[in-house]
């Protein structure tokens, strides 16, 4: 059994290891060390298989449906949940012929700016579009002893001019030098704190349908 350091995960915000040959059952067992593995949508399996897809072949309301084979913007996974999952586990089966990276951004960096921005992150409302389960929320949530960031421009829509301006401000504040680039090899295992880190998919040098990552979404216990 692969042991995961909860202390390191809490302090650093992510863990990256190389452990070739893991199967889905082992990834679920690893996930259970830190929380509760859950399905990301109705009828899905706990272990998602992620490969670049053309828009027409992607699930409705998914990032692939909106962005196709292009890069994905920095986002919070399961932002459409009332409380997003705490951790995301990604495992590289095949990094793909396009050498496509994943980028991580520590959202705590946003607190390094003026106090007004911190206030806006915690108070400016956005609407999460999730059919009849849509709801209002903020980018930084600090209710009920839970503190987390939630950002997904594909499902979160500004409800005011202040919201539109805040998204623009965030875009301008996220500098390339603050991004951590994950270059995938076969057997790479990445676990990240989804309440703290935004992540996005980079560009590919070519069509890379052979890229395959397994993903497990993990709720806090």
Image (tube, rainbow, N blue to C red):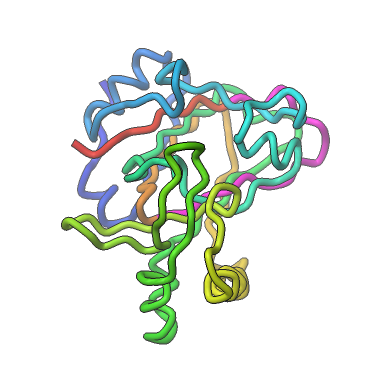
Residue 114 lies in the magenta-colored region:
no
Q: Quadrant of the N terminus?
A: top left
Magenta-colored segment: predominant secondary structure: loop
Nearer to the camera, 211 or 199? 199
Q: Is 25 drawn above or below residue 109 in the view shown? A: above
Residue 23 position (above or below residue 180): above
Q: Position of residue 191 (x, y in %)?
A: 39, 39
Residue nearest the observer in this picture, 67 or 120: 120
Residue 77 % position (x, y): 46, 42
Magenta stretch: residue 199 in it?
yes
Q: Is residue 173 visible?
A: no
**Residue sitting at x 71%, y 38%:** 99
Q: Residue at x 73, y 23 (%)?
A: 57
Residue segment shown in magenta: 197-212
Pinpoint residue 19: horizontal percent, then vertical percent: 42, 26
Left or right, 113 with respect to 52, comes to left
Q: Is residue 206 visible?
A: yes
What residue do we see at 41% from left, 85% from top?
A: 116
Residue 131 vs residue 68, the one in the foreground: 131
Residue at the location (67% across, 47% down)? 202
User: Which residue is most to the right?
Assistant: 206
Q: Quadrant of the C terminus?
A: top left
């Amino acid at each position: 059994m692969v042991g995961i350091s909860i202390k390191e995960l809490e302090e650093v915000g992510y863990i990256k290891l190389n452990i070739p040959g893991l199967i889905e059952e082992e990834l679920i067992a690893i996930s259970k060390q830190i929380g509760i593995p859950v399905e990301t949508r109705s009828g899905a399996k706990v272990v998602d298989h992620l490969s670049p897809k053309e828009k027409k072949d992607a699930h409705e309301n998914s990032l692939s449906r909106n962005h196709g084979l292009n890069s994905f913007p920095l986002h919070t996974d399961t932002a459409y949940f009332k409380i997003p999952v705490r951790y995301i586990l990604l495992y590289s089966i095949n990094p793909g012929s396009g050498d496509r990276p994943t980028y991580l951004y520590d959202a705590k960096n946003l607190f390094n700016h003026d106090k007004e921005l911190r206030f806006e992150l915690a108070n400016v409302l956005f609407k999460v579009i999730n059919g009849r389960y849509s709801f209002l929320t903020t980018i930084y949530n600090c209710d009920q002893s839970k503190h987390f960031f939630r950002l997904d421009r594909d499902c979160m829509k500004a409800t005011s001019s202040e919201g539109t301006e805040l998204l623009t401000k965030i875009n301008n504040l996220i500098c390339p030098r603050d991004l951590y680039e994950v270059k995938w090899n076969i057997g790479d295992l990445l676990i990240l704190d989804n309440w703290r880190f935004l992540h996005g998919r980079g560009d590919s040098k070519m069509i890379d349908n052979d890229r395959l990552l397994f993903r497990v979404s993990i709720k806090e216990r």
